[in-house]
Amino acid sequence: MTTITFISPDAKQHTVTATNGETLMDAAVENDIPGIDADCGGGCACATCHILVPDAFMTEVSHMDEDEQYLLDFLDNRQKNSRLSCQIKVTDRLDGMVITVPEQP
């Protein structure tokens, strides 16, 4: 099990325990994290699971594929560390990560 903290758009911290192999989106949805709507259910088709990954963990998450890049390009609030939580699998290397959930535009 891996401990992940989500900072919701209202600046509240939500610490959850995630199972290795599930996605960050799954962990967020299972724990009712505000700001993670996951409208497409994890199909990398909507960008409603947008998160900001801390710089210290950017090398620990999987590389972004073309589909994710395309969806993120449409976000007004995209940042250099923007990712879709449906595309990141939980591993032991993510233990202790603090993720920011940006305000939906």
Image (cartoon, rainbow, N blue to C red):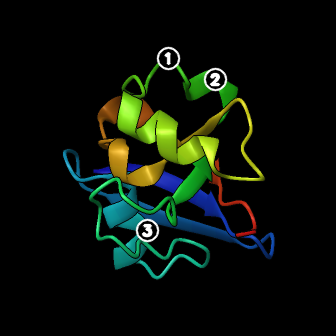
**Measured Cα–Cα span from mark 2 to mark 3:** 20 Å
Q: Position of residue 50 (x, y in %)?
A: 56, 56
Q: What is the quadrant of residue 21 in the picture?
A: top left
User: Which residue is under mark 1?
Assistant: 59
Q: 11 left or right of 54?
A: right
Marks 1 & 2, CB-CB < 8 Å contact: no
Crowding at mark 2 (Cα within 10 Å: few <14, some 14-19, many 20+): few
**Measured Cα–Cα span from mark 1 to mark 2:** 7 Å
- Along the line of sight, the residue nearer the viewer: 96 or 78: 78
Task: Answer with mark 3 or mark 1, whichever residue precedes in sequence.
Answer: 3
- Along the line of sight, the residue nearer the viewer: 91 or 36: 36
Q: Position of residue 49 (x, y in %)?
A: 49, 62
Under circle 2, the secondary element is helix
Marks 3 & 1, CB-CB < 8 Å contact: no
Q: Position of residue 61 (x, y in %)?
A: 42, 28
Query: What's the residue at 34%, 53% (across, down)?
Result: 44
Residue at far left of view: 21
Q: Is residue 40 above or below residue 49?
A: below
User: Which residue is under mark 3?
Assistant: 28
Query: What's the residue at 23%, 53% (across, down)?
Result: 22
The amino acid pointed to by label 3 is Ala
Q: Position of residue 101 (x, y in %)?
A: 66, 60
Under circle 1, the secondary element is loop
Q: What is the quadrant of residue 64 in the picture?
A: top left
Q: 37 left or right of 14?
A: left
Q: Is residue 97 visible?
A: no
Query: What's the residue at 29%, 70% (across, down)?
Result: 41
**Measured Cα–Cα span from mark 3 to mark 1:** 21 Å
User: Which residue is under mark 2?
Assistant: 56
The amino acid pointed to by label 2 is Ala
